[in-house]
Image: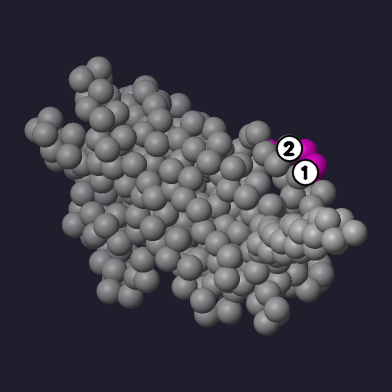
Amino acid sequence: MMGKMRMHSASWRAATVLASVLLVGTMAACGNSDTGGGGTKDDGKITMGFSQVGAESGWRTANTTSIKESATAAGIELKFDDAQQKQENQIKAIRNYIQQKVDVIAFSPVVESGWDTVLKEAKDAGIPVILTDRSVDSADKTLYKTFLGSDFVKEGKLAGEWLVEQKKTATGPVNIVELQGNTGAAPANDRKKGFGEAIAANPNLKIIASQPGDFTRAGGKQVMEQFLKANKQIDVLFAHNDDMGLGALEAITAAGKVPGKDITIITVDAVKDGMQALADGKFNFIAECSPLLGPQLMDLAKKVHAGETVPARIETEETTFTQEQAKEALPNRKY
Ligand code: GZL
């Protein structure tokens, strides 16, 4: 009997230990405020999982600052991931946020395509998704609640229309080189489209070379060096963002040409360094693309979390700048 009892008490102790281990393990798996587990916190705070493109440009830096500061101001718990311009990193981050059961996922898709599978996983998990800055080409619009960002086709169109006006008296060919953003990115595809459609108004305006510079200064400089080597006469540079234009300045100067005079330079964004180059006469025109999306994003997250209907598309308000307008605007620029 004793033996059995002993056995019984020993097996009882084992069962107790096992139950305790299982209980602790279950708690850890579910997560909690200490382990960064997802979902609305006990204090009712909304948790947002955000996947950022990377840190490739001054625009991106300003956009990240706007998102982080706005999350704090809105009392939203922000989980932030920098994808270093790689789609697979964004998909991984979104899957992590789904695992952590965050309340809302927001991201700026580095490229337009290849998102349906992971967005369906988020939808099946009941986690709403907000697109910010860039959009996706998914046919299923139920995969996300809204797209908050600029109209990139319009930005390219405004850049092209300014050039058409500037060159309306040209009697011969006007040779244009184009620095594109990263391949497959919505701003690269759409700015190219808008600019190309606008300059078609004047057959003298010809794009003689167009290559990706990946929205970085290094990319802009490297590709502009190639353009200058391969093309004897370049009259205009259209860069899809300020950073590539700023990188190109180094190549243009090194080639003994005067930026803003020998080569007319048109860019997009209007970040501080770009506006300074414009005010200094090195750039000639900038179409603005505001990175300050944080406040609107957090407001949308609260509405979506509360189950409110939000507009499917919210377009950022922005303008354009000439050299004179840049001089006036610079002192008050927020980014
Ligand atoms: C535009 C944004 C682009 C900027 C670039 O909304 O996605 O990406 O124009 C940035 O500067 O790298």
Residue at far right of view? 1
**Does residue 54 lie above or below 306 as drawn?**
above
Residue 14 rendering spot, x and y as whole percentages: 75, 57
| Image mark for residue 164 | none
Residue at 59% x, 43% y: name it.
92
Q: Quadrant of the N terminus?
A: bottom right
Residue at 34%, 42% in the rendered image: 216
Residue 206 location (% of width, % of height): 40, 26
What separation in Å lies between label 2 and label 1 (alpha carbons)? Answer: 5 Å
Q: Position of residue 12 (x, y in %)?
A: 81, 62
At 55% from the left and 52% from the top, the residue drawn is 51
- The residue that mark 2 highlights is 117
Query: Where is residue 283 drawn, in percent x and y?
Result: 26, 49
Residue bearing mark 1: 120
Of residues 65 and 80, the one nearer the viewer is 80
Circle 1 SS class: helix
Q: Nearer the viewer, residue 159 or 190?
A: 190
